[in-house]
Image (tube, coloured by chain):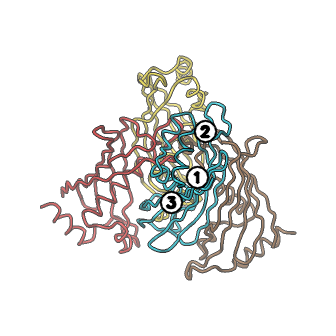
Chain colours: A brown, B red, C yellow, D cyan
Amino acid sequence: MDINFINQTTLRVRYGETDQMGYVYYGNYAQYFEVGRVEAMREAGMSYRELEETGYMLPVVNLQVNYLLPAKYDDLVTVKTEIVSLKGARLLFQYEILKENSVLCNGETTLVFVNKLTMRPTPPPKNFIGLIESLNK
Amino acid sequence: MDINFINQTTLRVRYGETDQMGYVYYGNYAQYFEVGRVEAMREAGMSYRELEETGYMLPVVNLQVNYLLPAKYDDLVTVKTEIVSLKGARLLFQYEILKENSVLCNGETTLVFVNKLTMRPTPPPKNFIGLIESLNK
Amino acid sequence: MDINFINQTTLRVRYGETDQMGYVYYGNYAQYFEVGRVEAMREAGMSYRELEETGYMLPVVNLQVNYLLPAKYDDLVTVKTEIVSLKGARLLFQYEILKENSVLCNGETTLVFVNKLTMRPTPPPKNFIGLIESLNK
Amino acid sequence: MDINFINQTTLRVRYGETDQMGYVYYGNYAQYFEVGRVEAMREAGMSYRELEETGYMLPVVNLQVNYLLPAKYDDLVTVKTEIVSLKGARLLFQYEILKENSVLCNGETTLVFVNKLTMRPTPPPKNFIGLIESLNK
């Protein structure tokens, strides 16, 4: 099922996120993607926190990042997140990190709904599917 | 009860632990202290992992760090950890981070034994106290 | 010189900042303090970025943290930062991390102005002192 | 130019690297890859530190990670790193994170040699190419 729901959120680069090259350390973009993902889900009406509390986990199974231009300390960047699609238990997100009109970085993550007890992939809860269908209209 | 058990372990500074000043970010020393603490407990015969699995948590309630000289990328540093004392539920550790013979940083942490169910401070398990008494001889 | 300038800023706890205890990892509060510090300086009219660009560094020489209550994933917390005083090259900050009206954590950091070329402590630039005097009135 | 140089190094999962799911946070594998990369280069006779000191940077331009099984706190994992190939300024690394005989995670990174002054892609220094040719025999 295609979703194509887009959220934009901003964050400011922290000193501890830079490395001695003077740029944001490449591993820290995964955290920026997570911030975007959480805010996209929140705007869509899905709380990740609530999802966990009702017996689901949503681990990341694949991450891809392209680093185009460096983000620097104190930069105010925009994380543009698209909830792209749900296929079975798999939820695909795509991201762009922007500074003004430049794309610094893009990438994607695939997450899988997992039942906390059995630790096996599982379809998302019905209210989640309902939400996605309503976003989709 | 005084303990005065000392462990030394080494670690290599990772690129992602530096910041744009070219030094290890000040917040990352807490993780170095944790590495020292875990290895000191392991050498003393106490597995922190096991402790958690048997119903305890051991959160840090106080952290103090003095930064004397910077650690740099790829430095091989020694974490010297002393399990200083156990007073009631409170376990005191002191640390020095050394590069060759220079002290880069020193500090201490106080941890408290907590019962995972009640979330309240609790004396450590008996086998832990036994261990400490045996270290102490 | 006493300063007593107070700033409040908010941040949302990220998933990657928690640990398996389910709380924010104790080392990550140093980064929250840094966020508060930077925003306090920005509000006071001092850009840390600019300071670095004009030949200064401001490393942390002492950190103290008291952990009172845990912060959890997705919590929206307030970082209350006070620029307390400037004594010679030493700048003292104090912090409280609050969730609604509960103090989760408090602490302080001492930073020292350092000349980037000589790497020695140095009085802050004059415009910085001027700013502080004006805050102080 | 194909290289196919393989290094194995081990590391122990730190508490601060886990998240509230109880597993290593997905963003932290980038740091594990970096540890493997640095050790592979060290074993091959190339010091990344030296490379930076002689006027080069080697930023990551692409990262891909597949998460198969979770790594947990205190796990002793092996990072198996292959320096795969050098094509122009582009250096390709592939990784596996193993626990005993299970692959927890695999992935790759592409890095590009950059001249620190011009900030433009540049062929690697000659001694580096010489080294690679000698590894290759």
Answer whether labels 2 and 1 touch (C-beta < 8 Å).
no
Of callouts 2 and 1, the N-terminal one: 1
Q: How many numbered discs?
A: 3
Residue A50 image point, x, y percent: 63, 69
- Crowdedness near tag 1: few (<14), some (14–19) or many (≥20) residues, C-alpha within 10 Å: many
Quarter where residue C120 is shown: top left
| Foreground tag (2 vs 1) | 1
Residue that label 2 marks: A73
- On the same chain, marks 3 and 2? The answer is no
From what the image shows, is residue C23 above or below residue A11?
A: below
Residue B10 image point, x, y percent: 34, 51
**Residue under the point 51% across and 64% down:** D24
Residue that label 1 marks: A27
Residue that label 3 marks: D6
The numbered dot on residue C116 is none
| Foreground tag (1 vs 3) | 3
